[in-house]
Amino acid sequence: MDNRRALDPAQSVVVEACAGSGKTWLLVSRVVRLLLAGVAPGEILAITFTRRAAQEMQERLRDWLYELASRDDEYVRDFLRQRAVDEDEIAGLLPRARALYQQFLQASPPITISTFHGWFMQILQRAPLDSAGAGGVELVEQTSELMQEAWQIFLDSLHGAPDGETAISMMTLFGEIGLSNTQSLLRNFVGKRSEWWAYTAGEEGALACALDKLQREFAVDMDSDPVVQLFARPHFSDDVRALAQLLDASAAQKSRAERLLAPLDGELPPDSRFARLWDELFTQKNEPRTIKANKGQDVEQLASAVELVRCQMQEAYHQLQAQKICRINAHALRCGVALLDIYQGLKQDQQALDFGDLEWRVSQLLGVPEHAQYLQYKLDSRYHHVLLDEFQDTNPLQWQILQSWFAASTAAGTTPVVFVVGDPKQSIYRFRRADARLFDVVRKFMQQHYLAVHLKKNETRRNAPAVLAAVNGVFDGLAEYPGFEKHLSLQIMPGHVEVLPLAEQQNAEQETVNGKLTLRNPLLEPCPDAEEGAREQEALQFAEKIDRIVGVWQIRDEGRLRPLEFSDIMVLVRRRTHLKIYEQALRGLSIPFLTSRRGGLLDTLEASDIQSLLTFLITPFADLALAQTLRSPIFSCSDNDLMMIQASGCRMQDAGGFDSSAPGLNPESRTLNPKSWWQRLRQLVEEGDASAALLRAHRLLQGWLLLSDKLPVHDLLDRIYFEGDAKPRYAASVSAVMRATVLANLQAFLEIALDMDAARYPSLPGFLRKLAELRRADDNDSPDEGRVGQSGNALRIYTVHESKGLEAPLVWLLDTNARPPADRGYDALVDWPTEARVPAHFSMYCDKASRGAVREPYFEQEAALAQREDLNLLYVAMTRAKQVLMVSGSGSQLEGMWYQRIADGTAENSGQVADDFAATGAALREEAALAESHVADERLTQMLPTGVRKPLMSDAQRYGTWLHALLEHQAIAGYCDELYDKLQRKLNIPPELMRGLWQRARDLLNKPDLARFFDAKYYQAAANEVAYVDALGQLRRIDRLVEFEDEVWVLDYKSGATKSTASFSAQLNEYRLAMQAVHPEKSVRCAVIFADGKLAEV
Amino acid sequence: MSSAFFRSAAQQILSRHAAPDLRGARVLLPNYHAALPLAQALSAVSSSPALLLPQMQTLADWVQSVPQDGPVQSDTQRIAVLYKMLRERKWFPDANLWRLSREILALMDELHVHQVRPADASDEFARQLAQAYRSPCGQAMQFEASVVHELWCQINHFAVPDASAAYQLRLDSLAQQPILPLYVLQTADLSAPEARFLDACREKVEVTVFDLREMAADDPSCTLLVRALQPGGDDLLSAAAGLKPCAMLNSAPDSRALSLFGAHGQEQEAQAADVQIRRWLLDGRKSIAVVVQDKLVASRLRALLERAQVSVQDETGCPFATLSVSTVLMRWLTAVQDNFYYQDVLDLLKSTFLFADEPSLRKQAAYQFEQMVRKHGVIAHLQDFISVAERHCPELLPALTRLQQASDVLRKPVREEANGAPCHLPLSAWLVALQESLELLGVIQGWRQDAAGVQLQQQLLQWQEELSSDTTACSFAEWRRWLAQQLDLSSCRDLSVESPVLFMHLPATRWRIFDAVLLLGADATHLPSPVKAGQWFNDRVRATLGLPLSTAAQTQVRDDLLALLAMNDTVLATWQASCNGEPNMLSPYLEMINALHLLAFGGDLMNTELGGMLAWAQVRIQDAGCRIQDAGTMPRPVIPADLIPARISPSSYNSLVACPYQYYARHVLKLNDLDEVREELDKRDYGTWVHAVLQQFHMQVPDVTARGLSDAEQVLRDISEQVFAAGLAHDYLAQAWLLRWQALIPAYLDWQLENEAAGWIYQAGEVPIEIEVAENLVLRGRLDRIDRHAGDAEKRQVFDYKTQSAAGLKNKLKEPGEDVQLACYATMANAALAAFVSLDGEKVISVAPSHDVPDLAQQNVERLQTVFALMRDGAGLPAHGADPVCGYCEMRGLCRRGAWELSQDSGVRMQDVENGKPETVNGVHHG
Ligand code: SF4
């Protein structure tokens, strides 16, 4: 490809680059070229798809710029040459290249490398025009809880007004499609709210207007009755009769003829007459029945008679169906809009936005050209260069926003230079409304309006030729995949593609002895896994193979061979639905893995242990939670321990012994509530019957119970981990390969707690609820950005969506013989032509049978897009593999599934493993016991008590302090009332004490022996809080220093009651010496004033 | 070197003031920690035995000495005023007006402080703005201009000065007073009014500024720092070439050192900081500053330090909103506002601050309330809770009554509003009501025993007082939002700890010297934190108007960082080089310092020793007495005779078959999952109702054929409505379930007719039966329904209604003996036939076992006998449930399947030794 043009700072460019072709390299190189060309960092806006990608770009840019600043000239020249800088310009650019690093680090405003959402937030935050954004908003990622809350409120509102329009609509929906379908329908409506708003934008009565459009589209008259009209047609009965007559000619069809005639004259209501006729001419699936001409019948005549009747009936039928669709839409939209209002209201209350809202807001804001232009001036950054990464995943709304932005830029006098890079083959975010067709539209737009050049890149640096051969084998020439161009590999390294045979279901054989039935004895024999499904077989096959090849196969890493490790393996699935089965198989073989399933963490035994422990702490009668806690490695209690506890309860019960200290057990409820396990455990401990493990458990739990309502959750957990010695105990209780994963899970759990503590209004019950919600949210199967961190040597499992931008030496595609998820129905149907500003169609649909002929083209289009995206997913999945691609699946082979496509595409080159991989190194499973690392300094493993909690001031001390303060102030300012109030507030003196203190201070000042120190009449000078520093550099403070003609008095306040002065003499002597040094000419005298006003000279 | 800065300041002061009495000079400090080193420097330079120090104060405290005449309008009050204005003007109908008010207030203060006066006329101001924006003056801009302008005019209307105006006034009058020669310790730029004040002072006395930035620039050992942090300059290589070794930052371990530690993730960063701090403590360092840039890591670090009993003196404080003292407050308000949703009530009852005068009442109430909710399924409305409690749990009433009374205090004003519109009260009135209700709840008492609680209570009272003259009327919800914002923005400090380890923010380090400094969270997003650009204006406009730029805060951070590094000899900066697998960049300041250092001296500043220590340098508590469970084996508990159950039901028999350990846990240990509180009706309720409907129906209509279909249908429909009625009253969704059932009624009657046609006659329903199947073992259960045959009175059939699909039921029966329910029922009813009746979907279908039922029944009884005999003989109950059973088993935490399964498998698995792979080891070698 032509890097010269792609990197030319003045040229807008659209690059279509295949997977692994170095898009990031290109994009960051372009940024460097821009900076070299004198573009300020603040003038550059780069948008990519994930935060991780943004961070990586930022990092790469910084590293390159550092190299430019620090390496020798030859290196820099070479660097610039690679980035297609003209040879004759290079010398001149050197100084600039060297300065970029510092310029980049210090730039203000800095370069913007962000995601769409990050950038949108920036815009909203700077837009006082956006009324809802004013004052700041918060972006929420998890909305399932909010949705649930909205649903509850919605139901409550209906309950309160059962005769309202909405409630009636809801009832109709319940009746027609059932509860759970209604719920999906309405939730899906809320999910498509941007489309709905766009569709009904600017309309007064959105609902009525949408329905009206729908009825017009269906050309349906809601008030007519098509059946009645049909029967009222003059010819219809005749046509049926004619048909019957024709049929009557054949003996075999006489009865049908009669059945056709019967409804014509019967007394039945028109609907059932219609239904009966329909059943004769159409199958249950509403397809035309085949009515063959028999002997004696004219084939054509019969066919046309049948057709004549059928046509008329179908017309009526379509009318009926259309009416029904419109009716359901009316109800569904009414309820949907009501639910949506509640949902939006909730978010409004919390000033929260989700991603969808954010996009919609920004599109609305920038949709007004004047506002868009205003924002150009408003932001501190003026973007002259816009770089868009992964453009195939942009959705129409985002594109609209960009267009508005570009237009406004142009209007404001700077037409941006735009760089677009992407790969329509990797467009996999339809569920986030990304539209792969957009790429072409945008390309044309850019070519036309920005004179962009269009470049294509089909060489990859990532995949080994063998992997690439498989990719080409699958996609090259594929009719459903137009536009694919053969990829070339720039890598020379061994590769391998292996398609495993499909796993089949294993059927267990019935065991009968002598034909007689014998039942399994469950104590002796486990339940045979009778129903080991095909998928379980595949999982087993998968886990076993991994187990065999890790440590054995050789992988090329930075030019050197080394044995394959778990962390080299990336496992990909299309959806998370069946992940548990594969995880189970991996656990079975002690293969460490990390999964991005959030619930995956919470489902682990260790996380469930901790949740049980916390549950017990807030619900001490949760016996099962306590029992699990005891069994966990933190306590390692045995089943015998548990039976001890249970048995002690029985004993007490038999003896009628109840713990009266138990909360809330009045005589009546005692019989209902036998002792809780916790009470029994306490009893056992008190009676001295507890085992060592139980004793320890009791002691620790007792302590944690006391802490549980005092400490924040994270601190509590940390205490638990620490005092319970949790991590080492868990480490010792699991196999070595799993150790890192288990410990990482425990840590991850702690981090969730830390995060939530930092949120508002934390509490332990709230924390547990949040966890439950996280687990539930997992069900909705929404692909997310991967959250899998690096943790030891573990295999990673991702959905294909999450694997975007990642690569691995070995990629394993699981479950490739599965059909892509079918449309579940009960959703909104939207047709939003790529270039249109608003959708062309919006309606709700239920199941397949109720689609209606008019909507068929939309459904077909949807299906085509879904099909295309499924292939894109496969493309993404396959191209993640650097060296090895493994493919497995289960069931009997289905046409058109990934499995078949890969199997066909690799028919010639799959098979034996190449020598490079099979070579057995003396590789080891990372099995070695956790090396006891060498303790270099014992002291660091021990307690180091540091710091003290200051004792609170005693009442007497506080009283003394107040009195001295009042003394000083009164001495200066006198006794005015204003001062009274002010001092009370300032010193925070309780009103009931103030009056007394005030009076007391006043009395003291009037005392002759004190007055001379406080009344300015008597002394030359006086000062409070006189600071001095002594010869040792110690800072000292004298409470009051009063100077007379020939003497100087040092006064020290003591807050306690009068005591002997002996204990203060050392301190006061120090003062005396110091002041003597300062006032060598005067005599220095020292005295203490006690809280009761007594003065004692020292 | 650090003390050199103080030394040179001391020399200058002493050159103009004679020791030993320096009281004729005044020093303005950035904070009081700088006093001691300065005093020491003065003492050292003067070498007199005692030195009366200059007046040393912060400017803020000095200003305090000027009496404030007249009242000052507090910020709380001004925000209320702004809020009211915004609310009336309806400019921002959807916005969070409280937050907006605060932002606008900040802007107003800024304008004020910088003595910017917007043009008199709004249009004029808009033109001014347009010029600054260099854009055409469109509608949007006019809007911005008019908002700012109008609010500006309004808010400056008040006679009472606000805090910043008052400060200004006092500064002015301070400048009028006779003053001593001034010395100012400074690291960053002063605010505008303070700068003006110094200018005024300069006219009367000599003002000497000790600016650390300048002092550092003159100090050869700081060249690298200064060069790295200053903007612009020559290129990196030549800058590096110009550096002298004295500027090296990590020359020797115990003299002057800055080092950097890039951690993998949060935990490692916290651990590194923890270990380093304890090393410093062990070294005998007496003051260790932890400069907190990243709060989250700091919380983690504090927990780690506390493991080693190192307590932390925290100067940073944290917002009230994140403290449990405010959780109780906000939960209470949520409960009042949202009709006492049970989770809020539970949270309340589980907070120690509630009913602090009567802790036993609370504990008991928490326990009983939870039980009540689980049992009776009431999920909201205090009144509903009370009426359920009256019937089932009278002990709970005192607690509920207290909640009721306390809620009345807040609710009363709402209810008094006659027309039902929400009641509006001034904020202070709401606060008064809040105090009263919290008093009634015993929360105030609870707060008194907690340092943060005391501060919160003081804070609430202070707001109440500040707002006492404010009249902005707000609804309950508006007030709550206000309160939430207040709690977000004010913070609480724990001042009770004294420790050499201090947590602080960067500005608090000005002119301070520590034995060691740990800069926590020194990444690009935290140091400096991103520019907080407001919604109003941009930098160009700000520059034009004379306001500081949005980047001023960052410049300040940079200056503070420079000062910190210049003043302190031992600094470790930590950051997360990667977090969640994403790269995370180092602070650009430190990046520059490091790069320059690397180029100049060939070594970077990365700390290399700490990483290796983390593994062993952890404090740990080990209980010597208690063994650690190693990778275990499958449990197989042996049940002592006195714990073997004497009764078994068909469903517990099922559990015994599916997994003996599960049976053990459920029926020997008698453990149960707590009932979940069900907020929505679900299939279980549906099943219960359908059972009840059919039971009642057949009592009335045993013979549908005889009664006539339509008549029977009517009866069934009536009964259905009656039975569902209870649900309908409480739950809207009951309607949907009822509709679902009603749709099935015809199918059910068809099925019943067919059944009758086959000669079966309904005999009884819901029949409890117990039979002795072995010595000491009774099988007991309840049968849904028994039919007898018309032709043969002895011929019986048992039915079990299921709301599952027929396919699922068939699957249950596929393996004979794996589901024992029907066989048990047949045994108990002595019936030859048994079937499930699937009431699901659109059809009603009976599903019977394919095996001969009497044989099946017999076999099952025999097996039961065998199993119990084995149990008595000491056979253990293994935990070998099949995967699908385990998938839904609540006992997984007890049998710990997963923990041993792995190890067992891998242990048993023989490795191919010839292949050079070792045996799998789990602490135990398997031969
Ligand atoms: S999890 Fe499985 S093995 Fe464990 S008790 Fe439950 S059913 Fe049995």
Image (cartoon, coloured by chain):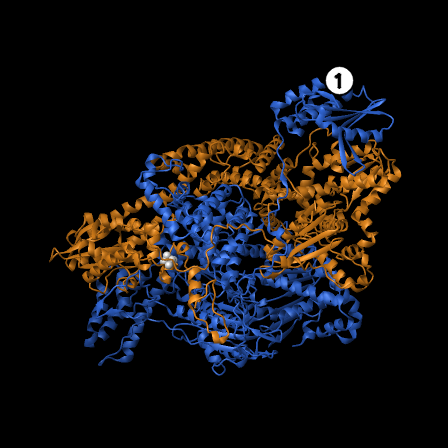
Q: Residues within 10 Å of mark 1 (few under 14, many from 20)?
A: few
Count of picture labels: 1
Q: Position of residue A75 (x, y in %)?
A: 75, 72
Out of A695 and B190, give the one closest to the viewer: A695
- Left/right of residue A902 with respect to residue B709 in the rendered view: right
| Quarter occupied by residue B31 | top right
Q: Quadrant of ligand 1?
A: bottom left
Q: Is residue A866 visible?
A: yes
Front residue of this view, candidates A17 and B15? B15
> Left or right: B402 with respect to B645?
right
Task: Classify the position of the C terminus of chain A by image quarter.
Answer: top right
Residue lying farthest bottom? Answer: A908
Shown colour of chain B: orange
Secondary element at image label 1: helix
Q: Which residue is mark 1?
A: A1009
At 73% from the left and 16% from the top, the residue drawn is: A1007
